[in-house]
Image (cartoon, rainbow, N blue to C red):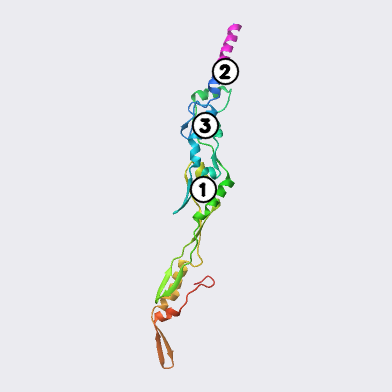
Amino acid sequence: AIGVGAGAVVLLGGAYVASYFVAGNQLPAQASVEGVAIGGLTPGEAADVLRAEFGPALEEPIALTAATMSAPLVPAESGLGADFEATVREAGGGFSWNPAVIVNNLTGGEDVPLVRTVDDAALSGAVEAVADSFTVEGVDATLAFVDGAVARTEAVEAQRLDVEGTTEAVKGAFLAGRDAAEAVAVSEPPAVTDAMVDEAVAAYATPILSGPVTLTYKTATMDLAPATIAGVYQIGVKDGLV
């Protein structure tokens, strides 16, 4: 009986060791990374598969956009990358004598996300380097009289890139596996806005052009036509007022 029992232990031990060499150093049969199958591969083989599948995407630019403006950010040049070995470990790769792990490697496994990495300082620098692509110089609104009529131009708000906010937006998009991110832009009103010109037109320009002004000296009178008054009237900005 002792001999039979010892033989059975030897046989079980041999089967266990054999199972280890078959499945103890391979990924679970159903393991995959964002749809890329790596089940049954060794950790090294799996890392190579992931590098071949996802590596090229790290050279493809992320489209950073804001309205009609855009700039590309290449992940590999912007502090964005992937840790393929860590991804393999997350998928269940690595040596193990644990029977439960060995059984799972033979029959189990699931889809896991790619482990993406971010160098915050490098990414911030890359975003700052494209900030000029999103810069808009502000333009003041103007008001003048031309040929006896009101002439005005519209204001343009200044715009600059919020580097910190945009860095976070790119980081979030990359970690989510997206190839585009919305830039965060900050607008600044010009010194003379359209609203200020509207007020000046209502308060000054329209009354000036509403009709002639009659000058009286003793018994003499003279009418000044609106166009004449407009020709000598100057409109400017002082202390923030038109």
Q: Which residue is mark 1?
A: 169
Residue 72 x, y percent position in the rendering: 49, 48
Residue at the spot 47% in from the left edge and 32% down from the top edge: 36
- Front-most of residues 190 and 10: 190
**Badge 3 vs badge 1, beta-carbon distance below 8 Å:** no
| Precedes in sequence: disc 3 or disc 1 | 3
Q: Which residue is mark 2?
A: 17
Q: Is residue 13 magenta?
A: yes
Q: Dot 2, crowdedness within 10 Å: few (<14), some or many (≥20)?
A: some
| Precedes in sequence: disc 2 or disc 3 | 2
Residue 27 x, y percent position in the rendering: 52, 27
Mark 3 secondary-structure assignment: helix
Residue 7 x, y percent position in the rendering: 58, 9
In the rendered structure, which amino acid carries the disc numbered 2?
Val
Residue at the spot 50% in from the left edge and 31% down from the top edge: 49
Separation of marks 2 and 3 at Cα, in angstroms? 27 Å
Mark 1 secondary-structure assignment: helix
Q: Dot 3, crowdedness within 10 Å: few (<14), some or many (≥20)?
A: some
Which one is closest to the eye, mark 3 or mark 1?
A: 3
- Front-most of residues 97 and 55: 55
- The secondary structure that most of the magenta stretch takes on is helix
Span of residues in magenta: 2-18
Label ID, residue 48:
3
Residue at the spot 58% in from the left edge and 44% down from the top edge: 119
**For this view, does 119 lie left or right of residue 195?**
right
Label ID, residue 218:
none
Residue 147 x, y percent position in the rendering: 39, 76
In the rendered structure, which amino acid carries the disc numbered 1?
Ala
